[in-house]
Image (cartoon, helix red, strand yellow):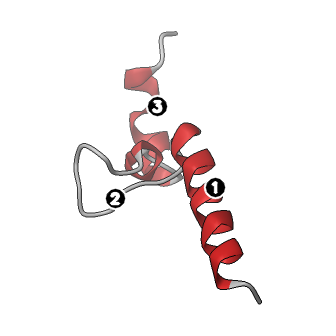
Amino acid sequence: MDRDAYVVCVLEQLYRALGRRDVFASPSVRWADPRARLLDGPQWEAVQADVLPA
């Protein structure tokens, strides 16, 4: 395996992921994945009526 070619490939994939905003810094509040904070399941069902208009 050509190490330099591998590094270029990894950097290219990272660049593409950054452009799609698919790379997140998990301990950060500002740069964390916003989908991780969404409510799901019973928590969403409990507040759904208050959030969505009738």
Side of 5 where 47 appears, left or right: left
Q: Which residue is farthest right?
A: 1
Q: Specify the label residue 22 is tagged with.
A: none
Q: In which quadrant of the rendered image does the N terminus lie?
A: bottom right
Amino acid at pointer 2: Ala
Amino acid at pointer 1: Glu
* Disc 3 secondary structure class: helix
Q: Specify the label residue 12 is tagged with.
A: 1
* Disc 1 secondary structure class: helix
Side of 19 where 29 appears, left or right: left
Side of 27 where 24 appears, left or right: right
Q: Identify the residue shown where x is 48% and y is 11%.
A: 53
| Residue receiving disc 3 | 48
| Residue receiving disc 2 | 25
Q: Nearer the viewer, residue 17 or 32?
A: 17
CA–CA distance in space, label 3 to label 2: 29 Å
* Disc 2 secondary structure class: loop
Q: Identify the residue shown where x is 59% and y is 39%.
A: 20
Earlier sequence position, callout 1 versus callout 2:
1
| Disc 1 crowd, CA 10 A, few/some/many (<14, 14-19, 20+) | few
Q: Identify the residue shown where x is 50% and y is 50%.
A: 40
Q: Mark 1 and 2 residues: CB-CB less than 8 Å, in contact?
A: no
CA–CA distance in space, label 1 to label 3: 41 Å
| Disc 2 crowd, CA 10 A, few/some/many (<14, 14-19, 20+) | few
- Looking at the picture, does residue 8 appear above or below residue 48? below
CA–CA distance in space, label 1 to label 2: 19 Å
Residue 49's x, y, as percent? 45, 25
Give the mark toward the camera: 3 or 2. Answer: 2
Residue 23's x, y, as percent? 48, 53
